[in-house]
Image (cartoon, grey):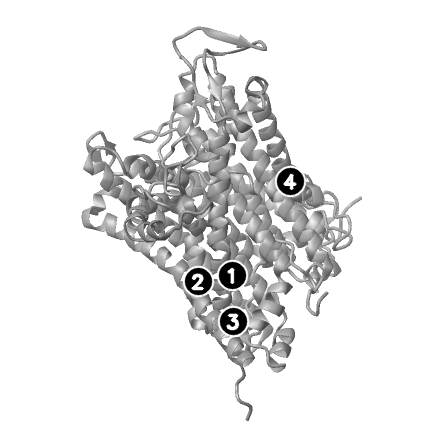
Amino acid sequence: MLAPGPSTRRRRISTITWRILTYVALLLIMGPAAWLLISVLAHAAPHWQWSVLWTKLTPTGGGLRDQILGTLILMLGVFLIAGTIGVLAGIHLAELARPHKRSGKASGGFLRTSSDILAGFPSIVLGYVGYTALVVGLHWGFSLLAALIILSIMVIPYIAKTTENSLRQVPTGYREGAEALGMSMGYGLRKVVLKSALPGIVTGLLLALAIACGETAPLIYTAGFAPTLPHSLTQAQFPYLTYVVYSYYNAPETQYHYLAFDAALILVVIVLLLLVASRIVVARTQRHAESARGSVRRRRPRPARPEPDLTLPRR
Amino acid sequence: MTTVGGVAGSIPATPQADSVGKPPLPRRVASFFRRHEERAWRGSAWVAVVLPLAALVFAVTVLAVKAWPAIRVNGWYFLYGRTWTYGNGYGAVVHTDGVAHPQGAQFGALAILWGTLASSLIAIVIALPLSIGAAFALTERLPTWISRPLGFAVEILAGIPSVVIGLWGILTFGPWLAKHVYPIIADNAPNVPVLRYFRNPVGSGEGLLSAGIVLALMIVPIITSTTRDLFQQVPPLPKEGGSALGMTDWEVANKITLPWVRSGIIGATVLGLGRALGETIAVAMIGGAALRIPVNIYQPFTTVAATILTQLDGALTDGTGFAVATLAELALVLAVISVGVNLVARVIIRRTGRIGAPVGGA
């Protein structure tokens, strides 16, 4: 056997250091993440009262009923507006504007780029645009409608991207099969292609909703804030949870501090529910895909996961 | 033409007595929809896909129009000036180039721009190595039963609302850093040009470094999950070949895996940078919102996004509307920076992606 020389020792040290550093990196990410969740819980739990969920916000404290409802209404509105537009845009990018070559001139290339740029647009800038154009320019005032439009514009690119990615993972054979069976393009799209891409689309929608319910900055500029739900789409400020966290945590009264922590906890719970739901959707479809393939469960090659939002290096 | 069979795509109809002649109304409606379905799909999808572009053009136009008076009056001073003052709100209104603004109003955004770039750079410097290391641990080292839940934890971190992260940062994390971590750095930082910036006083935890660290925590999920996906797409054969030739883990990672996905990581990093540049609420809470260049890395500062958020109320008191126009100019600058960063990311990815597999000294 060879005696380890200086070079071998150096290589061994470097590889052990590398292994340790990767674990340390993981720990440095997971530690604060866990601390964050525990801290939110620890701040909210001691004073938690379930009545927060169904009492109104009053000048002396009260609950967060209308703020929770407001956040849910915003999510529903974003789901309807951005969901429809985003999914349609994704269908266009993946199915209708199919590029002729992979690296050649894609007909949807320009539109895709503009959608990607919009995805990277700072939310506060969109909020300012909403404030200038909708709140002031169209005289809507701080309102639900302005907030919905700006939030929708914010998440449409995201939904379009995830829809496009999951449509691209539908095998071409499905489309050809649908066509060979004499289905019209629209019918085939609806019954075959969209159906098999649905889990990915739903996942994207859920994650977009998670983004929408956690936004603060653009909402301050478009929705304002109100203690109770208004009765009109425009001319009335709108309540939502994130503002409570942002502005109540350093309010002079302690009961407002508790409300801020409660709101933070509720937000985290909503986001967790959305993420778990998206996980369940993914897990179910993976099981279905496997049973369709008839492969043994333990020898699956690698879970199919959506591509990252980047052009990947190709072999 | 009388329809006896079905329309293409439906079940072939068996000839029936009542199908001769005009089909019943429900079927006519259904066939109308079926015939026009493709056109409906194409039309609505086209409208939907043009909307983001329209929104983008609309946003930039609104900002440019709104900011135009401020751009004309502030001029280049906006980019290098250090004084940011609304002027005398009760004093005389002055006209410069036909634009009304309060006397003494002066808007130099150097400190704001500086704070934006500095905090984002700190975030990237911290987040990039952590993300790559964590992605390696998740894909190459840990077994699936433990890396899956941890991957989900990273997703949760990505989904936590930034205002909640800001709350934790200002109440728990920032004070903890100022008490336990910063003194160690500050006491040991030597008095040499760059490291001088790390010296005392450490402050209360509201400031540039705290905001940078929290921003790093917010962009870590972006870079980690992208990098993890990229690592999983590196084919196993080159890695196994490297191991078979006697390369250590570190050498396989450094010479095979990382070069293979380099462009993707750069792209993800630049996208994370874009997120850090535009992050508003957490920075507004943790940064301390001070409109000056901090004297050391622990002191309060502000960013473009945080300034737009926190200064609106103040700007609205300016009766001439000039302060609001200046905020629009800030927003426009931020938009230009983030669009530029985004495009650079895309160019990098496209260029390095075309070279192909960089293994073997390519």
Q: Which chain carries label 1?
A: B
> Residue B166: x and y, percent?
36, 43
Of the residues shown, which amino acid type is indicated by label 1?
Answer: Ile
Can you identify the residue that label 3 sits on? B140
B159 left or right, relative to B262: left
> Residue A9: x and y, percent?
51, 79
Crowding near the residue tagged with mark 1, few <14, some 14–19, many ≥20 C-alpha atoms within 10 Å:
many
Tell me if residue B110 can be seen: yes
> Residue B146: x and y, percent?
42, 70
Can you identify the residue that label 1 sits on? B132
User: Most extreme residue toward the front, as rendered?
Assistant: B191
B299 left or right, relative to A135: left
Q: Looking at the image, which is closer to me, A230 or A140?
A: A140
Q: Looking at the image, which is closer to me, A86 or A291?
A: A86
> Residue B322: x and y, percent?
49, 17
Of the residues shown, which amino acid type is indicated by label 2?
Answer: Ala
Q: Pick whichever of labels 1 and 3 is earlier in the sequence.
A: 1
User: Most extreme residue toward the right, as rendered?
Assistant: B1
Crowding near the residue tagged with mark 4, few <14, some 14–19, many ≥20 C-alpha atoms within 10 Å:
many
User: Most extreme residue toward the top, as rendered?
Assistant: B92
Crowding near the residue tagged with mark 2, few <14, some 14–19, many ≥20 C-alpha atoms within 10 Å:
many
Contact (Cβ within 8 Å) of mark 1 with mark 2: yes
Can you identify the residue that label 4 sits on? A114
For discs 4 and 1, the disc positioned in front in the rendered view? 1
For discs 2 and 3, the disc positioned in front in the rendered view? 2
Can you identify the residue that label 2 sits on? A25
Contact (Cβ within 8 Å) of mark 2 with mark 4: no
